[in-house]
Image (cartoon, rainbow, N blue to C red):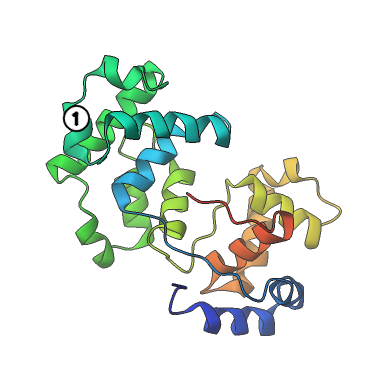
Amino acid sequence: MRPPYWLRAKRALAAADPVLGGIIAQHPRMQLVSRGDPFVTLARSIVGQQISVKAADAVWGRLLARCPQPTPQTVLRKRATTLRACGLSERKVEYLRDLAGHFASGRVDPTRFAAHSDDEIIAELTEIRGIGRWTAEMFLIFNLLRPNVLPLDDLGLLKAVALHYLDDVPTAELLRRPGRERVERLAAAWQPWRSVATWYLWRSLDPVPVEY
């Protein structure tokens, strides 16, 4: 099911930004979809760090074979050696167990997220080992369907902005603070739908949505 704001956001972005309007028109029957429960979404993000999508899928499949219901409690009950046998590095095992500990103890409680701002959730999630700001922002977009996230550390977003708006600026330059400030100024026109704008800019580079 698409987010309840999706059609309203599409219309507003197309009216405010002709470039986005053209991209949106090229993808008329696609929309953002929420992915799984919060713990599984974040666990998969840890599993997939710094490896290919194919490798991450294989490791996740082996983890599910040993832990068919990957809840915080079941992950914590598994020995570190069992988790490493799935293909996880020692560091990723530590990250996964820290994530499970935060959920099991209630330090991270998804039932409270609805009352929290994006920044509050980012601050909460980045206290977990292995969860950085980019991962927290992907969680806001893909799991909580928050409408106004602008992930300035995302290379895909920066590449699309350079391609469609700033063809005189290399993507690498946008990674620097002045470059990001330029992207922020450009994205002011996308408020309060910056997640939707980002999602369509991703589609302009790859029409197949990535799942997080």
Q: Is residue 185 visible?
A: yes
Q: Position of residue 131 (x, y in %)?
A: 39, 38
Q: Is residue 97 above or below residue 69?
A: above
Question: Which amino acid is tagged 1?
Answer: Leu
The residue positioned 71% from the left and 72% from the top of the image is: 20
The residue positioned 21% from the left and 39% from the top of the image is: 72
Which quarter of the rendering shows the N terminus? bottom left
Q: Is residue 133 above or below residue 78?
A: below
Horizontal side, residue 108 vs residue 18: left or right: left
Q: Tell me the crowding category of disc 1: few under 14, some 14 to 19, or many 20 or more residues within 10 angstroms, Cα based.
A: some
Q: Position of residue 71 (x, y in %)?
A: 22, 41
Along the line of sight, the residue nearer the viewer: 203 or 137: 203
The residue positioned 38% from the left and 47% from the top of the image is: 41
Residue picked out by circle 1: 76
Horizontal side, residue 163 vs residue 93: left or right: right
Q: Position of residue 171 (x, y in %)?
A: 75, 45
